[in-house]
Amino acid sequence: MSIQLKKGVLDLCVLSKLSYKDSYGYDIYQTIDNILGISESTIYPILRKMVKEGYLTTYLKESPEGPARKYFKITRFGKKHLENLKNDWITFVRNVESLLVEEREL
């Protein structure tokens, strides 16, 4: 899959994952990597940006496997942004599909 296509949907993927439950960076990375195949270094700048923009908050939680982990939690503002991104995505996919259908009909 194209790197540009992946970059365009990562915010949507991160917020979507966090809309179900809070999670830490490596877990978020693994979930998205299993589906899209991304680099681990890709996810952390996105998480930092989303915290700065107010879409996420963070807190520390003890880990049985070592030091405390930083967990990310979606904010009310982040949930609203997620809904906007979902609507944009649905519109985008429909528009691209309509172009692909037109192309097949030619």
Image: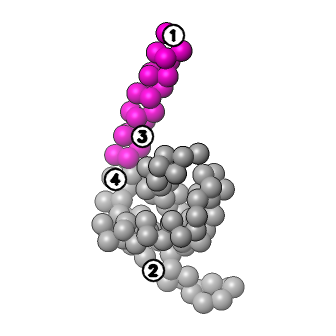
User: For mark 1, does the 10 Å Cα neighbourhood hold few (<14), some (14 to 19), or many (20 or more) residues?
Assistant: few
- The residue at 49%/9% (across/down) is 106
Which residue sits at x=57%, y=87%? 68
Three-letter residue code for mark 3: Trp
Residue closer to the observer: 73 or 103: 103
Q: CA distance from mark 2 to mark 1?
A: 53 Å
Q: Nearer the viewer, mark 1 or mark 4?
A: 1
**Mark 4 / mark 2, whichever is N-terminal:** 2
| Alpha carbon distance from label 2 to label 3 | 30 Å
Q: CA distance from mark 4 to mark 2?
A: 21 Å
Q: Is residue 103 found inside the magenta-colored segment of the image?
A: yes
Secondary element at image label 3:
helix
The structure residue drawn at horizontal position 63% and vertical position 64%, both measured from the top left corner, is 30
Is disc 3 surrounded by few (<14), some (14 to 19) or many (20+) residues within 10 Å?
some
Report the amino acid beneath label 2.
Tyr
- Percent position (x, y) of residue 88? 36, 40
Which residue does the numbered mark 2 point to in the structure image? 59
Instruction: State if disc 3 and disc 1 touch (CB < 8 Å).
Output: no
Q: Is residue 11 left or right of residue 41?
A: left
Distance of label 1 from label 3 (alpha carbons): 24 Å
Q: Label 2's element?
A: strand
Look at mark 3 in the image and give the residue it sits on: 89
Going from N to C along the chain, the mark reached first, 1 or 3, is 3
Residue under pointer 1: 105
Quick one: label 2, few (<14), some, or many (20+) residues within 10 Å?
A: few
